[in-house]
Amino acid sequence: MFEHIIHCKSTNEIWQTFDRLFNKKDVARLQLLENQLANASQGDFSIAQFFLKIKNLCSKISALDQEEPIFEACMRQHVICGLRPEYIPYVTSIQGWAQQPSLEEFESFLSSQESLAMQMARLSVSEKSGDTDNKNVLLTERKKNFNPKGKKSDSKSSNNASNSSNFKKEKFKCYRCGKLGHMKKNCRVKLKQGNWAEAKKTGK
């Protein structure tokens, strides 16, 4: 250190020498941070996360360039430029206010709008899910009540089957007793002599 100030003639000159040595601007890093700030966008960040990102960049830039600190108005402008399109109507509304909010008030307002939008989205999803459930119930009921080929119901179908069976039985004639409704092997009619078929052959 002494080598740097050996030729200084006053304490003020020594101080200025040290200031030039240790308070040099990191020009390359400063330029990088300024570019990041200029191109900052919200993307998938929430409002709180995006505001924090802008604040951190501005804080780092101000630390490297203390002669030109970044004020709230400039920070708010960078926030507005990087917001997603759905927040632009709210920004336009705020810009029409007689008294502009502070950076914290601005963040709080946008966060409230973000929370409201999320609640509406969840409600919409819930309603769509309910509509789907109702449709599934209706489809299930229709499947239960559906009978292919125009059949009316199981009970009526069984009645039709019974009637059809009775109709078929009526066509059968017993060759033992000559009566309708059963066959010879199922005949229980008591005959005096022979059977109806034999009697018919002999003419009795």
Image (cartoon, rainbow, N blue to C red):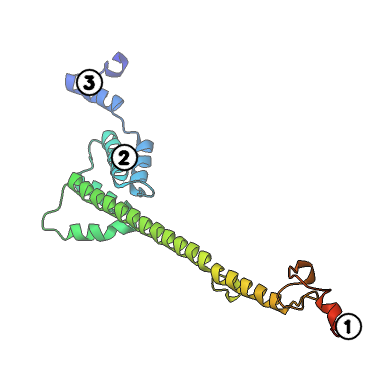
In the depicted structure, whether residue 38 falls above or below residue 33: below
Report the Cα–Cα distance between label 2 and label 1: 123 Å
Q: Secondary structure at mark 3?
A: helix
Q: Secondary structure at mark 2?
A: helix
- Crowd rating for badge 3 (residues with CA inside 10 Å; few <14, some 14–19, many 20+): some
* Amino acid type at image mark 2: Leu
* Residue at image point 21% right, 22% down: 15
Report the Cα–Cα distance between label 2 and label 3: 33 Å
In the depicted structure, whether residue 56 falls above or below residue 167: above
Q: Are marks 3 and 1 in contact (CB under 8 Å)?
A: no
* Residue at image point 25% right, 53% down: 113
Q: Secondary structure at mark 1?
A: helix
Which mark is in front, 2 or 3? 2
* Residue at image point 54% right, 68% down: 155
Q: Which residue does the numbered mark 2 point to in the structure image?
A: 57
Q: Which residue does the numbered mark 3 point to in the structure image?
A: 14
Which mark is in front, 3 or 1? 1
* Percent of width and height locating residue 55: 27, 40
* Amino acid type at image mark 3: Ile
Q: Which residue does the numbered mark 1 point to in the structure image?
A: 202
* Percent of width and height locating residue 3: 31, 15
* Residue at image point 29% right, 47% down: 47
> 36 and 51: which one is in front?
51
Quadrant hosting residue 84: bottom left
> 151 and 114: which one is in front?
151
- Crowd rating for badge 1 (residues with CA inside 10 Å; few <14, some 14–19, many 20+): few
30 relative to 186 in the view: left or right: left
Which residue, as the protein is rendered here, is positioned at the far top? 2
Q: Earlier in the sequence, mark 2 or mark 1?
A: 2
Which mark is in front, 2 or 1? 1
Indicate the quadrant containing the N terminus: top left, top right, bottom left or bottom right. top left
